[in-house]
Amino acid sequence: MGKTVPLTIDGKDVEAASGQTILEVAREQGIYIPTLCHYSRTTNVGACRVCVVEVEKAKSLVASCCMPVSPGMIIKTDSPRVKAARKLIVELLWASGDHNCLNCEQNGACELQNLIYWLEIEKPRFPIEHPGYDIEKTNTMIQRDLNKCILCGRCIRACNEIQVNEILDFSQRGSRAKVGPAFDTDYIDSDCYFCGECADACPVGAITFKQARFAGRPWEVKKVKTTCTYCGVGCQMDLNVHDNRIVKVTGNRAYEQPNEGSLCIKGRFGLDFISHPDRLTTPLIRKKKGGELVPATWDEAYGFISQRLFAIKKKTGPDSIAGLSSARCTNEENYLFQKFMRAVIGTNHVDHCARL
Amino acid sequence: MTNSIEEIEFTDVILATGTNTTENHPVISSRIKRAVRQRGAKLIVIDPREIDLVKYATLWLRQKPGTDVAVLNGMMNVIIEEGIYAKEYVENRTEGFEALKKVVEKYTPEYVEKISGVPVEDLKKAARLYAGAEKASLLYAMGMTQHITGTDNVKSCANLAMLCGKVGIEGGGVNPLRGQNNVQGACDMGALPNVFPAYQSVISDEARVKFEKAWGATLSAKPGKTVVEIAEAAHRGEIKAIYVMGENPLLSDPDITHVEAAFKHLDLLVVQDIFLTETARLADVVLPSACFAEKDGTFTNTERRVQRIRKAVPAPGQAKADWQIISDLSTKMGYPMSYASAEEIMKEIALVTPSYAGITYERIEKEGLQWPCPNTGHPGTRFLHKDRFSRGRGLFHAIEYIPPAELPDRDYPMILSTGRVLYHYHTGTMTRLAKGTMERCPESLVEIHPLDAERLGIQSGQIVKVTSRRGTLQAKAKVTTRSDAGMIFMNFHFHEAAVNLLTNPALDPIGKIPEYKVCAVRVEAA
């Protein structure tokens, strides 16, 4: 462990670890400092300035997310100067975009909305300027509404520093600055892999999941933690359920291993099959070879199978029966399947497609 | 994996061979890319295709398909020749070094270049980089295993890692990246013809007696047949009935014409699935099952981590969880299974599966546990073989290079290799129903090198005909340098261009894995 750094924060004397930022120390101490552009496990950029604090003898307010602690620092996180600055910044953010919550998908889960409410801002002192961008609707997965973008850069860091897909970046400057793929193309025309990390990272309604549009408000949606059904990584994810339907899939960085909240296109956007009309809903039996498969009850199906299996076992022995289990099914099901083949049928002809 | 996914990010050198990680395990690929971009790790890619990972690599060795043993032996040749192997580790923790040394002696970089096409200097650099690292993680996937020498390839990876002392350490290991969500768990649970749960052999009297007691049944001591052998036996009429749970062998098996004929021979085919798959269409009975979002249970991921799935939505119609279906059928057949929940089954698993003995739903509620987890106080195991291998000393296998079963000739002058793409999964039954993934990748494409394309008069987007000794298909061409000249690549997600009509069912003699990565084909403009 490095040396500790003595400092005072909101009148409290604390020992911080060397190299910590003011924000990290404050959070450890249970002191709330609002943030927007800060995104853990990515570079601290100090872009939004809502995390500013007052440091005695510093010339100006400092961004607490970027400022490392130094010995003897006296920090105030809630002084009138800090409060006024925060308010000004948030009002500027509000005024610089089309932050209309009425039909925004993030309504109720928006960090800017929360901050405005927390700061008790009735309305911004500046006129609201609609940036006039077209909403990107050229793909079915991710919707981009740059009118709501606050240029915090979280999506860019998620893309470059977490997924390392290196698709998103800033283009243009000043008030024309915007985020997107190279050459200002739409996602679908870029090399984007549609992992959706940018949408999970977006604190506002600028990047949202298209298929979840109007499918359920954040407070109506129940999140069910589960393991992705695709590859062997076993990503932990939240199925967002509304009215018994999965409306979207989100990552959750609090789940830690193995994926720390990251997902790929298959887990994120590949679950339409669950509610597909082609799903099998009833047992089917082909009573005669060459006949059609017709719907049957479970009892009929079980009766048919057990009668045939018994007959085959009696005539040609248990080793004339084989079972293929599945790398797609659960441990519990694989366990039962091989137990069934071995203990009930009496054969070791049981395998699955691990090899394919 | 001997080691954990997290460790990949914090190692010094990553050797990725036969894994197109960004497409098949995207989230693991982010770890590799972060290790390279943010932590200064060095990446060595050994792959015949110019996969995305190559962009992040310090070294890329483009070997001819199926020459992996030669390349790995060549690296070991350099490492032994230059005396940069882990002498103490080899001395104290392994056996069989002299035999290995003798075999790899002839695999000089010059000889290996002749076989594999990998330039002498690149091979030497890769060998030095891997051997010289304090920590190095070796990653592989189906690019190593889907060969007639699949087992040899994997053993060669293990040889290299042990030679350099990279097994049994944090950030090291020999790490297979498994392709299916629960392929690890299916193996752990004994869904294999020769073993009970936790790899307890069916020919071991002790294991059999244990399971006979636990299950109250008489068990067979005769090892069973593998998937491909089962299809063969069905074709010969030796197997009369097959019960398939959640698999689609009619699209995933090699040489599917043969498999279809075999399945049509059966007296009884039962298929339990979520869709009427190609296989289900042939069935006598089809049973509707619940999908992963409609039931409780556990999957075991590629790093041996046992994790929960949870019921989020109801199953459609009368569909039931697979475990309920098996329980019901078993009860109907006079062997009562009366589990009230998936959790109850896990309790039974823990009793008979030593590596899962400490795993309970309560313990894995927040975060999964990695087996071996022998008791309920055990924290799980991040990496295997620390201080000692399971068998005591790590055993080197001296392995000679064997060429693929089918190489190009005058009639079939090109190599076909198969695999997945990012946007789809296995036989496509799930991803092909998703708007988003279909939008990104709506059809199968034949990856072909510009030199070959020009020679054959083929342009991107044009329909081409691909023919092997076993079948023929048509699909659109994608002209790209990603696959080398003389080689084409196709995925197996699309039944319209079912690439397993073409693939060679030649098997690895031990792993019984078909050689999906190499077969000979002829390509022509359609």
Image: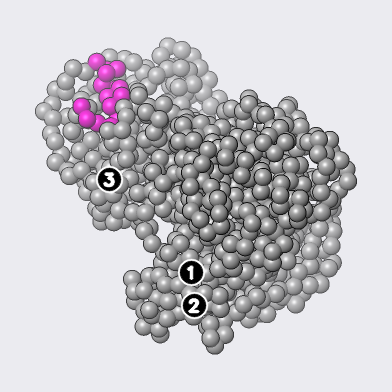
How far, Cα to Cα, is label 3 from label 2? 47 Å
Q: Position of residue B27 (x, y in %)?
A: 50, 47
Point out the residue furthest to the right here: B205
| Occupied quadrant, residue A42 | top left
- Mark 1 vs mark 3: in front: 1
Q: A166 or B302, which is in the foreground?
A: B302
Q: Is residue A176 left or right of residue B45?
A: left
Is label 2 in contact with label 1 (beta carbons under 8 Å)? no
Q: Amino acid at mark 1?
A: Phe
Residue that carries the numbered disc 2 in the rendered image? B467
Tags 2 and 1 both on a single chain: yes
Q: Is residue A99 left or right of residue A60?
A: left
Q: Which residues are magenta?
A: A102-120
Q: Quadrant of the C terminus of chain B?
A: bottom left
Q: Position of residue B61 (x, y in %)?
A: 56, 69
Q: A79 or B230, which is in the foreground?
A: B230
Tags 3 and 2 both on a single chain: no
* Residue at horizontal 34 percent and vertical 15 percent from the top: A78
Q: Write down the chain letter for disc 3.
A: A
- Secondary element under disc 3, as helix, strand or loop, is strand
Point out the residue furthest to the left here: A127
Q: Which mark is residue A179?
A: 3
Is label 3 in contact with label 2 (beta carbons under 8 Å)? no
- Secondary element under disc 1, as helix, strand or loop, is strand
Q: Which mark is residue A283?
A: none
Q: A116 or A213, which is in the foreground?
A: A213
**Count of labels shown?**
3
* Residue at horizontal 38 percent and vertical 37 percent from the top: A248
Q: Earlier in the sequence, mark 2 or mark 1?
A: 2
